[in-house]
Image (tube, rainbow, N blue to C red):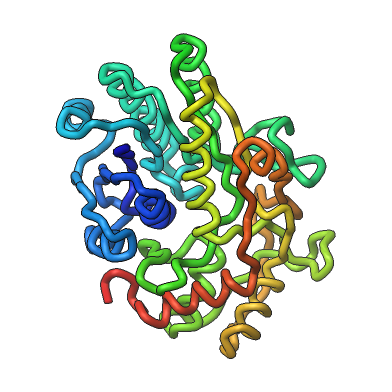
Amino acid sequence: MNVLLTGGAGYIGSHTAVEIMRAGHGVVIADDLSNASEKVIERIEKLGGKKVYFYKIDVCDKAALDGVFALHDISAVVHFAGKKAVGESVAQPLMYYRNNLDATITLLEVMQKHSVNRLIFSSSATVYGIPKTVPVDENAPRGCNNPYGWTKYMSEQIMRDACEANKDLAVVLLRYFNPIGAHESGVIGEDPEGIPNNLMPFIAQVAVGRREMLGVFGDDYPTHDGTGVRDYIHVVDLAQGHVAALDYTENNSGALAVNLGTGRGYSVLDIVKTFERVNGIEIPYRIMPRRAGDAAVIYADSSLAKTLLNWEAKRDLEDMCRDTWNWQKNNPNGYRS
């Protein structure tokens, strides 16, 4: 079958494209390249062993998206397209609501027109806000601390309502925890624009000499070393979770929310020390004030993914650190190398 990946040239999308191709499916990518490089397409093809059909379009452009569906016999969609920087969403909330919700609604409308009824959504653990208890399962209270999170929350609700209206529609809402790492080949990886918003690409850029020092936000949390604890998942494990979700939609309809995480929490300093030990590189850091809205601890209960999708994370923190450095040292300036 042919699978359309909106935003498929990005970090998670590119790794998912490779895994979908390796599962025997064709891949079509629609991406406006606002946070990605077209150079990744040929790298996906190299790893996946097949041609990728790529269209540089804005998914909010209904006519352009309709044209992609008209050209290809699309059986399912994985929806990654959307803006994703938390800080930017606070500064420019209207842009985030307009872009991310428009993309979701436009995609659902075009899918309905072409009778495509299988959809995997790139959601986020941000929909849980600051959890009162851990591990966090799919029934935990939801509530967000920033507009980016609310766009994920609202998109989930839009998709649930679409499923109520169309009983043939199958949607899996994949709530990611903290994806890190890179493909073990070092051919594709995370290449953020500007200053990284996330921990691991910042560490990697310090390691390769692009940045002087890592800032650690807070060392007075109630954790084993005072720094915040998160559930980090290898991006290839995450990508394989999308393939498992696609398989699930073949025989099931309705909306299903599923966590993708490891079920284990690591602190910021755990990540730094593991990266140093595995790769033999010192990462200088300094402690900075806490960021508003950061939780002390959050990690997933991913048992539902194992039960319903027959999926669980296989790669450990050492793999995540080793593969990150393999990508960064081979691509010191990312896809601009």
Q: In which quarter of the image is residue 113?
A: top left
Q: In this view, does 186 lie above or below 242?
A: below
Position of residue 215 measured from the top left corner of the image (x, y, whole percent)? 59, 72
Residue sitting at 35 percent across and 34 percent down?
A: 99
Front residue of 182/93: it is 182
Residue sitting at 64 percent across and 69 percent down?
A: 317
Q: Is residue 17 left or right of residue 130?
A: left
Q: Is residue 310 left or right of residue 120?
A: right
Q: In this view, does 59 lie above or below 222?
A: above
Quarter in which the C terminus is drawn: bottom left
Q: Can residue 331 be seen in this view?
A: yes
Position of residue 334 measured from the top left corner of the image (x, y, whole percent)? 34, 71
Q: Is residue 285 above or below residue 189?
A: below
Front residue of 84/120: it is 120
Q: Is residue 155 visible?
A: no
Q: In this view, does 163 lie to the left or right of 144?
A: left
Residue sitting at 72 percent across and 43 percent down?
A: 303
Q: Quadrant of residue 310?
A: top right
Quarter in which the N terminus is drawn: top left
Residue sitting at 33 percent across and 39 percent down?
A: 3
Position of residue 15 measured from the top left corner of the image (x, y, whole percent)? 41, 57
* Extreme-top residue of the structure: 165
Front residue of 77/145: it is 77
Count of residue discs: 0
Position of residue 48 measured from the top left corner of the image (x, y, whole percent)? 32, 59
